[in-house]
Image (cartoon, helix red, strand yellow):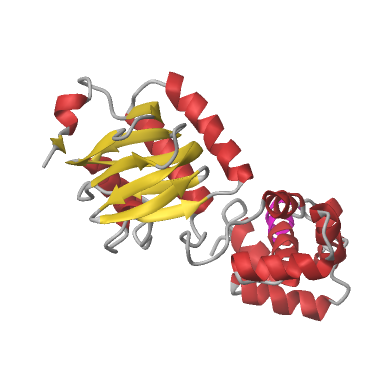
Amino acid sequence: MNVLLWQRIAPKGECFHVARAQMRGRYPCRRHAHDFAEVFWVEDGTGVHDINGQRQPIARGTLVAIRPEDYHGFRNTTDSGFTLVNVAFPRETVRFLHARYFPKEAGFFWARTRQPFQLSLNATRQRWLQGWTDYLARAPRTKLEIERFLIELVHELSGLSPSGEVEPTPEWLGLALEKIRDPEHFSRGTRQLARLAGRTPQHVARVLKSCHGITATDVVNRARLDHAAMQLRMSTKKIIEICLECGFQNLGHFYQLFRARFGTTPRLYRLRHHAFVRPTTR
């Protein structure tokens, strides 16, 4: 078995490696193991990932979090092959991040399944990763930079279902879900979500259900409640004013949804957060 060792392939003092590779030919990458972790994503083309004794198709937008114990390689399925970006880093980085920031995370590099964690990313998140690719290519190879990237990666993608369990989010829906977080849009309700998506409300509802298992009302209410929580923390507006600003017409309903989302009332939420800057003396 071909085993790659971090201390033998990484220059001394460097805490991560990043590269873009074009996989061409009949055997672009022989199967191998390693004592470090890595994450790769496919930028273009299609191929096959030989992983732990199984063959899994990969295509543009596929992201895989490889653990140190995984055994893998790649094969082409077309003459043009495919292009991927790989970011590798020591095992100790994985252990540190899990203990420090993600002790309850059961995916990514901490998945206990036979096959590694895999996602199919929409075009919006592919562009987000493109930005990170450009940044990491010129960033110093320090612990700060790799930990910053991995924390952002897990934070951005946590909660998404592994590919194969649900349909990938279409680009038009991903863009609409981003825009609906703006007060200008969420205050207009679920029909505005459909307008942003450029689809009928019924079509949006079907795709939301299949991709995320939620409704348009869930999306809009979450955006409204997150904005309300921010206003409670950062402003002195009256609660009724925040309620109406977010598009809720009934104060009691607002309180009910807020408690379900944050586990407390808007008033107590505000008092708890303001206590950090205006503590009461006893």
Figure check: 18 above or below 272: above
Looking at this view, name the residue that lies furthest to the left: 1
Figure check: 50 above or below 247: above
**Where residue 17 appears, x then y in whole percent?**
32, 28
Instruction: For residue 97, say whether it is visible.
Output: yes
Secondary structure mostly taken by the magenta-highlighted segment of the chain: helix
**Where residue 248 appears, x then y in whole percent?**
84, 70
**In this view of the protein, which residue sits in the foreground, 177 or 202?**
202
Instruction: For residue 66, say whether it is visible.
Output: no
**Where residue 253 appears, x then y in whole percent?**
79, 79
Q: Which residue is drawn at 38% across and 26% down?
A: 19
**Where residue 268 appears, x then y in whole percent?**
65, 70
Which quadrant of the view contains residue 232?
bottom right
Q: How many labels does the image show?
A: 0
Q: Residue at x 43, y 37 (%)?
A: 148
Q: Which residue is drawn at 72% across and 60% down?
A: 223
Is 177 on the left-hand or right-hand side of 166? Answer: right
Figure check: 181 above or below 123: below
**Figure quadrant of the N terminus:** top left
Is 182 on the left-hand or right-hand side of 88? Answer: right
Is 104 on the left-hand or right-hand side of 43? Answer: left
Which quadrant of the view contains residue 203?
bottom right
**In this view of the protein, which residue sits in the foreground, 158 or 34?**
34
The magenta span reads: 229-235
Which quadrant of the view contains residue 204?
bottom right
Q: Which residue is drawn at 20% across and 20% down?
A: 12
